[in-house]
């Protein structure tokens, strides 16, 4: 019998899977019923509540791609063995310009039986949009000009 992955191991598979573009594998890291929130998303992204919603969320990757890798990883264990707080950055280069970019993130994950049942993903969305060449459409959406972005 195989032991389920620890919260730390699940997080590492998630962040490396994002950086390596393994979009089809990422939904399997989540429980069938889950709760994934992006509280700081500037356009008020809805909570993702199922593996199917996550499959649609990850479909096709991030749109305009940028070269990235996880950096400055710190995983904090908590008094609750299911919960970790992970601080890290996606570091890489801006699409088309090779300008260095860092996207700071903090994820608070609850992992049960090797699957994410809850996640609050605090991402620097403006830096992320800039890295993907989507800052102008995001700012336009925030200013009320429409043309939203699928961050």
Image (spheres, helix red, strand yellow):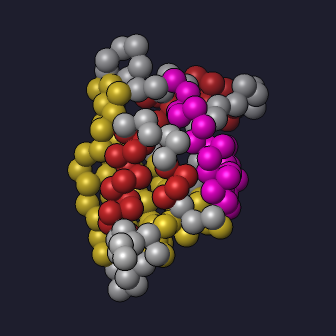
Q: Is residue 5 above or below residue 42?
A: below
Position of residue 52 in the picture relative to residue 131 (left or right): right
Q: Which quadrant is home to the N terminus?
A: bottom left
Q: Is residue 65 above or below residue 106?
A: above
Q: Which quadrant is home to the C terminus?
A: top right
12 within the magenta span = no
Residue in front for this viewpoint, 83 or 5? 5
Q: Give coordinates of residue 11: x percent, y percent.
A: 38, 59
Residue in front for this viewpoint, 105 or 111? 111
Q: Residue furthest top?
A: 96
Residue at x 46% of width, y 75% of height = 113
Q: Give coordinates of residue 82: x percent, y percent.
A: 42, 78
Q: Is residue 123 above or below residue 20?
A: below
Q: Give coordinates of residue 123: x percent, y percent.
A: 47, 49
Q: Give coordinates of residue 138: x percent, y percent.
A: 61, 31
63 within the magenta span = yes
Q: Is residue 87 above or below residue 24?
A: below
User: What count of labels does the image hold?
Assistant: 0
The answer, for residue 42, to whether it is visible in the render is no
Residue at x 39% of width, y 62% of height = 10
Which span is picked out in magenta?
43-64
Position of residue 145 in the picture relative to residue 29 (left or right): right
The answer, for residue 41, to whether it is visible in the render is yes
Position of residue 76 in the picture relative to residue 143 (left or right): left
The picture quadrant where one finds residue 95 is top left
Q: Residue furthest bottom?
A: 79
Residue at x 52% of width, y 42% of height = 24
Residue at x 63% of width, y 25% of height = 137
């Amino acid at each position: 019998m195989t032991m389920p992955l620890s919260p730390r191991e699940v997080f590492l598979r998630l962040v490396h899977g994002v950086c390596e573009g393994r979009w089809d594998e990422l939904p399997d890291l989540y429980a069938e019923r889950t709760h994934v929130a992006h509280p700081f998303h500037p356009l008020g992204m809805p909570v993702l509540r199922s593996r199917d919603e996550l499959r649609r969320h990850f479909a096709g990757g991030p749109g305009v791609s940028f070269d990235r890798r996880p950096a400055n990883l710190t995983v904090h264990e908590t008094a609750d063995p299911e919960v970790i707080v992970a601080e890290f950055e996606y570091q890489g280069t801006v699409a088309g310009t090779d300008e260095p970019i860092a996207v700071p993130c903090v994820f608070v994950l609850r992992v049960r039986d090797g699957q994410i049942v809850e996640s609050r993903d605090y991402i620097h969305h403006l830096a992320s949009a800039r890295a993907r060449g989507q800052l102008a459409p995001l700012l336009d959406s925030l200013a009320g000009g429409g043309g939203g972005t699928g961050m």
